[in-house]
Image (spheres, grey):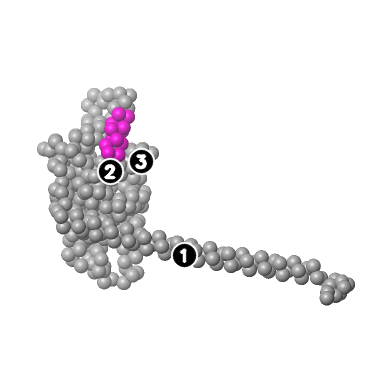
Amino acid sequence: MGATADRAAIESTGQALIERWTSEERVHHNLKRLIAVLARVDELAAETHQPDVVRLAAWYHGAVFTSAAPSAYAHRGGADAEASAELARSELGALGVPEKAIERIGTLIQYLSRHVAPGNDIDAQALCDADLGGLAAEPQRYEAYLREVREEYSHIPDRDYVEARLAIIGRLLERRTLFASPLGHGWENAARDNLRAERARLEIELTTLPERGEGEESHVAEMVAAKMAVLGEGPAEAGPVTEPAPLTAADRVDVARRAARERAGERRAAAEADRERRQREKAERAERKAREREAARRGRAADDDGSSMSRPPTR
């Protein structure tokens, strides 16, 4: 990214970021989740213009986080986008990353905090889709995700949590599309299947929960509003989001070229791995034959053992 700081300073900043993502209060929004987001960024990288900028925005998007109840009820679901963007500006600036790249990273973090990507900003679309792509995980991994999120917010009362989650799922399923980028659309069906299965389970669970006691306050509205703000809906929005603008012809050509370069890189890497494997097997065969020859030589020496003098000479 053009940093001018020395390697030690860069590695120190990276280590500090890892420590942020591994704090004890993070059960789901942790380093494992960040790695999953980065993996999905890689899946969508072929259609982005600045994949490394997108990756750095992913690293910083939830760097400042808390799962405390006040934040869960009234803040951005635990992640502080403003503070995270400011942290990125401060740390990347100290490393000498160009100001233009830093501002772009801050902008992408802001888009992600609202999950609203402009129709002509493919990098923002890819980042938002990579963050939301966990909804399309295989069912077992999706179940693990649900357990982690519930544990992370275990201090939220069961009825508040289930009612809020049901409302959020309903709002998501009303959307015309969950994902904005062209490649992200491939996750649509799996994500909807997971959400429908979760809704069915929560509807059953809700029937087993006790009603709120007299005077017991509900925080469902605040939780839903906070979460939907993170997912790109303001308080007045109730309908599905609009379809993202399609890629232009130039964008499609660029995507195709990037995909071709990635495939060529993968082929080169596979060829190199195959070459190394063949060399390794050749070395192993040579070593095995050398061991066999040495064993045979030792065997002949043991057979001789000085007794050859008693045998008649060969003609």
Residue at horizontal 21 percent and vertical 37 percent from the top = 172
Q: Tell me residue 63's x, y (percent).
A: 28, 54
Residue 54 at x, y = what percent?
24, 57
How many angstroms separate mark 2 from mark 3 (CA)? Answer: 11 Å
The magenta span reads: 189-202
For the residues labelled 1 and 2, the Cα–Cα distance comes to: 36 Å
Which amino acid, mark 2?
Answer: Trp
Report the residue at 20% width, 40% height from top: 177
Above/below status of 293 relative to 109: below
Q: Quadrant of the N terminus?
A: bottom left
**Amino acid type of the residue tagged 3 in the rendering:** Glu
Secondary-structure class at tag 1:
helix
Residue occupying the point 24% across, 45% down: 185
Count neighbours of disc 3 (C-alpha within 10 A) and say few if under 14, some if 14 to 19, many if 20 or more.
few
Q: Which residue is mark 1?
A: 276
Element class at badge 3? loop
Name the side, left or right, on which 26 lies relative to 258. Answer: right
Quadrant of the drawing holding the C terminus: bottom right
Residue 131 lies in the magenta stretch: no
Q: Nearer the viewer, residue 294 or 205?
A: 294
Across and down, in percent, residue 211 comes to 27, 24
Magenta highlight: main SS:
helix
Task: Read off the residue under disc 2.
Answer: 187
Nearer to us of marks 3 and 1 is 1
Q: Which residue is mark 3?
A: 138
Mark 3 and mark 1 residues within 8 Å of each other at the beta carbon: no
